[in-house]
Image (tube, helix red, strand yellow):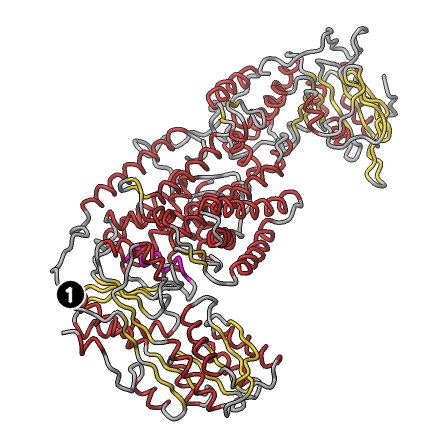
């Protein structure tokens, strides 16, 4: 007999499993409450607006990572794919190819890395951890070669406007990040491809047995992550005014942390876009709040790690 | 948008989250104890300074100078930093957060030429004065973004490189092979120091190797080890900053060449001063980030009080070698030579 | 696709001897398959009559799994012939088998635990609208039709939106069988369907198999359970060492004889 589900948070029993599933949104509210109490500067429209803008890049990366984690994979190349795409954008732009072309090239460059990752993992059956670790290094090398290690300044009024302006109080960065999240959620939960992604991650043998082309699906997942890096790179260049070729390990680890926080299983098959979004916002809120309360830099990784461990602990109750 | 298991808890959760978020937004609108439309007196000076990181003692000294001056003058000074010499996004985020708070003067040391411009745009729009500290921010990009700086406060890195060149020439007897350790590729101060050095030694010393060591001590050591093997005849090393210089000194020491290879670096951090005293480092062109921090606070105070401030304030530098190392150490972090402070003399 | 599976034109005879005008659904003759030095199948003959439940018995290593994989296109045979409704066919890939309407329920069931029952029933057969890579799922239809699929076979799953993870072993087995029966227009192969189930659940699954036969679905049942074979099957084949040791109509044999045929204690001829 199928056991009865918890009837719902409102007007019903609050089961531990339900709380576990919504750990990230609940955690986000808790963090907000804590910082609200700690300082009057946290919960102001200016600060929250800034917080959401800062979170946009991480959010987009987390959405790409979400796709890969759904098929029981992981994408470590994110840390260098973002600066790579940014470097391509910078190179094209400073060689006079116009912003539109530069952006398209950046997206293609990032997509290409994702496709290569996907081909190596899916068709050649190599371990995803190792493949993306390898591409992390290789792509980093290419980036340094392309830029000679320099940061390339990108002086674009359009990108600057993208970073600063918006529609009324709603900033373009939020809009873009939100659109990416909606798109990923739509694909995962409303399209056939999404079902294939969830199946491939949930039980690859069963998926293959049912006739799903699991290789193609995994390729799609890694390609999507690559594309997400490209989009994030455009945001990155807009925000910092240039293409910095340094390895972005913080963003890489945070993208994985956000997905884990959100309740997706690293073993695949279970995805939560709402959770990953909450996870990304939660991580960024920690950094923002710490800045305001002037907690030493060095406690931040401790807090971030603590939150991730807490989420992992809670997720045990999701079974 | 969660995996479709059961309809009801999910929509309940969405409703709960939406309610919570709405509540938070409403509360945010009221804030707690007032919004950005100032609490506190209009004349109160509140200064925010952002630099690259605090792991480099150079920036830690800048912070300390600023905080000390703030305490002395009785004004609020907040100093924050990114996580590393290359953390462009981290610094950007910190500055962005502070820009949304109630400060009326900003001092910024950028990681690269442009990474701080975007967060400064709203600051510039509010007509809050901004100081460019230590490393030049791209002027064109700033102008296009509508950001301008009330002043640049920093030491003259070109001059520092020249002084280093002079000192090394003297130590090497005017001739010989020399190697250069560069900083992070593209970092402006390092470029200027190298330029000054190269100009000074042109035609006299033979530059056999030029390698980046990213302002990192361990890298400085590794790179120097390689250089010593490839060019065993060198008698001098110029390092664009002290941490690399210390790494080079260690490599030279390990190779048993202390005393045979002269090493000059730039910055003047405590570890370097000690090394000069101990004879491991031949000399350092000491800059005074502590003084820069003090100057930044003084300039901000003047700017908030609507007094004029020179568009360029040069912080002092001095060659520290075995002859004055002890004195430098005892007066650290202050410069031990008096320097003309344009702010205290001009700003009335 | 969701109605009762298509049946052969002729009247299927329940006793095992094929009606004269129609060829049997599947006719396997002289099938051979080797893996390197191991000869898994050394000339297997087997006939599946349409609308019947045929059991496949044999000890470990007799070749049952290999035979099933040849039928499902996972391993193309080295030699021999497979005829489908009289026509020789080549099953080079699982897709070929699926095209012919052959569905299999493996011992691992092939269900995705974190997906809902309806999602599993429609796995890789989703009802969609739109085109291109973003085909949108028609969830409402799939959910309501899932209920029909399950109720038609009297499978007890009260909530098709629940995940398979929450289902008992018997329910999972029933869902997997119902899925195969729904999409398997010609043949449903089951590999040890009740091996991991308790008494009550085994009874439920066997009732489901009987309902399949009533609906005139052809079933190939691989089983170790002699009593089960005698309960649900019409015909039993015994494989021994890669060859067909015997064929018995279930009504004409006993559990002891079958055991003897499996172990070789009783000498069997290909057709009784």
Q: Where is residue B269 in the image (x, y as percent from the top left)?
A: 38, 79
B229 or C200: nearer the viewer: B229
Relative to C259, say whether A27 is above or below. below
Magenta span main SS: helix
Is B219 included in the stretch rendered in magenta? no
- Corner quadrant of residue A7: top left
* Horizontal side, residue C77 vs residue A61: left or right: right
* Horizontal side, residue C18 vs residue C168: left or right: right
* Horizontal side, residue B149 vs residue A272: left or right: left
- Corner quadrant of residue B242: bottom left
Q: The residue marked by circle 1 belongs to what chain?
A: B
Relative to A263, say whether B44 is above or below. below
Q: What element carries label 1?
A: loop
Is B95 included in the stretch rendered in magenta? yes
Count how many numbered circles sit on residues in the image.
1
Q: Where is residue C96 in the image (x, y as percent from the top left)?
A: 71, 25
Q: Position of residue B144 (x, y in %)?
A: 33, 54
* Horizontal side, residue A309 vs residue B227: left or right: left
Residue C200 in view (yes/no): no
C7 or B287: nearer the viewer: B287
CA neighbours of label 1 inside 10 A, class few (<14), some (14 to 19), many (20+):
few
Residue A11 in view (yes/no): yes
Q: Which portion, as a residue range, is magenta?
A: B87-98
Q: Where is residue B37 in the image (x, y as percent from the top left)?
A: 16, 52
A260 or C220: nearer the viewer: A260
Q: Name the residue under label 1.
A: B306
A156 or B344: nearer the viewer: A156
């Amino acid at each position: 007999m199928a056991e009865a589900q918890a009837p719902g948070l409102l007007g019903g029993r609050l089961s531990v499993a339900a709380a576990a599933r919504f750990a990230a949104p609940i955690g986000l509210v808790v963090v907000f409450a804590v910082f609200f109490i700690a300082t009057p500067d946290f919960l102001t429209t200016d600060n929250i607006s800034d917080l959401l803008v800062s979170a946009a890049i991480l959010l987009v990366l987390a959405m790409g990572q979400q796709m890969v984690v759904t098929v029981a994979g992981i994408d470590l190349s994110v840390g260098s794919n973002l600066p790579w795409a940014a470097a391509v954008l910078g190179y094209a732009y400073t060689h006079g190819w116009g912003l539109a072309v530069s952006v398209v090239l950046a997206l293609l460059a990032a997509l290409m890395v994702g496709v290569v990752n996907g081909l190596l993992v899916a068709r050649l059956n190599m371990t995803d951890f190792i493949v993306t670790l390898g591409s992390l290094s290789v792509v980093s090398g290419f980036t340094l070669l392309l830029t000679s290690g320099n940061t390339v300044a990108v002086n674009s009024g359009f990108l600057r406007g993208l970073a600063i302006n918006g529609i009324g109080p709603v900033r373009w960065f939020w809009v873009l990040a939100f659109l990416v999240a909606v798109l990923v959620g739509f694909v995962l939960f409303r399209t056939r491809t999404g079902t294939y992604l969830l199946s491939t991650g949930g039980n690859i043998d069963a998926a293959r047995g049912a006739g799903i082309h699991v290789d193609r699906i995994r390729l799609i997942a890694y390609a999507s992550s690559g594309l997400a890096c490209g989009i994030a790179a455009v945001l990155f260049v807009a925000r910092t005014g240039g293409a910095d070729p340094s390895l972005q390990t913080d963003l890489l680890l945070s993208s994985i942390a956000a997905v884990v926080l959100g309740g997706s299983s690293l073993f695949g098959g279970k995805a939560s876009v709402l959770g990953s979004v909450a996870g990304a916002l939660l991580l960024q809120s920690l950094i923002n709040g710490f800045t305001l309360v002037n907690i030493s830099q060095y406690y931040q990784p401790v807090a971030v790690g603590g939150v991730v461990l807490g989420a992992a602990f809670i997720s045990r109750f999701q079974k | 948008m969660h995996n479709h298991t059961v309809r009801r808890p999910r929509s309940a959760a969405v409703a709960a989250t939406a309610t919570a978020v709405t509540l938070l937004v409403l509360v945010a609108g009221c804030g707690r104890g007032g919004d950005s439309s100032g609490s506190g007196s209009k004349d109160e000076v509140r200064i925010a300074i952002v630099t690259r990181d605090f792991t480099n003692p150079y920036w830690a000294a800048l912070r300390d100078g600023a905080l000390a001056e703030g305490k002395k003058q009785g004004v609020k000074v907040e100093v924050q930093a990114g996580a590393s010499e290359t953390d462009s996004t981290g610094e950007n985020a910190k500055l962005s957060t502070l820009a949304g708070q109630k400060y009326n003067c900003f001092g910024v040391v950028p990681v690269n030429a442009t990474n701080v411009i975007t967060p400064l745009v709203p600051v510039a729009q509010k007509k809050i004065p901004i100081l460019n500290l230590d490393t030049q921010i791209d002027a064109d990009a700033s102008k296009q973004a509508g950001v301008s700086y009330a002043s640049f406060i920093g030491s003259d890195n070109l001059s520092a490189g020249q002084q280093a060149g002079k000192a090394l020439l003297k130590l090497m007897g005017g001739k010989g092979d020399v190697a250069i350790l560069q900083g992070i590729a593209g970092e402006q101060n390092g470029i200027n120091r190298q330029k000054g050095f190269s100009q000074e030694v042109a035609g006299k010393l033979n530059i056999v190797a030029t390698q980046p060591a990213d302002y990192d001590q361990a890298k400085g050591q590794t790179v120097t080890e390689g250089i010593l093997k490839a060019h065993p005849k060198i008698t001098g090393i110029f390092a664009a900053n002290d941490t690399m210089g210390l790494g080079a000194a260690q490599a030279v020491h390990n190779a048993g060449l202390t005393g045979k290879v002269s090493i000059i670096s730039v910055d003047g951090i405590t570890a370097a001063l000690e090394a000069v005293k101990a004879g491991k480092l031949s000399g350092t062109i000491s800059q005074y980030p502590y003084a820069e921090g003090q100057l930044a606070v003084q300039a901000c105070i003047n700017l908030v009080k609507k007094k004029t401030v020179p568009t360029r304030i040069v912080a002092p530098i001095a060659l520290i070698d075995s002859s004055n190392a002890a004195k430098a150490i005892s007066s650290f972090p202050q410069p031990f030579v008096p320097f003309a402070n344009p702010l205290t003399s001009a700003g009335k | 696709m969701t109605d009762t599976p298509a049946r052969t034109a002729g009247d299927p005879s329940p006793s095992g001897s094929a009606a004269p005008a129609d060829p049997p659904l599947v006719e396997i003759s002289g099938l051979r398959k080797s893996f390197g030095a191991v000869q898994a199948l050394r000339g297997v003959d087997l006939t599946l009559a349409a609308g019947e439940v045929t059991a496949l018995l044999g000890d470990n290593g007799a070749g049952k799994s290999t035979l099933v994989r040849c039928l499902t296109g996972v391993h193309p045979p080295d030699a021999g012939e497979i005829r489908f409704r009289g026509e020789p066919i080549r099953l080079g890939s699982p897709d070929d088998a699926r095209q012919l309407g052959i569905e299999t329920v493996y011992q691992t069931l092939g269900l995705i635990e974190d997906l809902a029952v309806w999602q599993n029933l429609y796995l890789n057969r989703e009802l969609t609208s739109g085109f291109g890579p973003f085909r949108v799922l028609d969830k409402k239809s799939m959910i309501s039709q899932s209920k029909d699929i399950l109720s038609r076979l009297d499978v007890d799953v009260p909530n098709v939106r629940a995940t398979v993870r929450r289902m008992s072993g018997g329910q999972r087995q029933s869902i997997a069988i119902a899925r195969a029966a729904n999409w398997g227009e010609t043949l449903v192969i089951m590999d040890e369907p009740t091996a991991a189930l308790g008494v009550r659940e085994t009874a439920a699954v066997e009732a489901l198999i009987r309902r399949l036969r009533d609906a005139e679905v052809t079933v190939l049942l691989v089983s170790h359970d002699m009593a089960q074979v005698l309960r649900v099957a019409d015909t039993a084949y015994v494989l021994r060492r890669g060859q067909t040791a015997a064929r018995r109509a279930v009504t004409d044999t006993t559990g002891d004889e079958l055991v003897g045929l499996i172990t070789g204690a009783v000498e069997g001829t290909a057709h009784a």
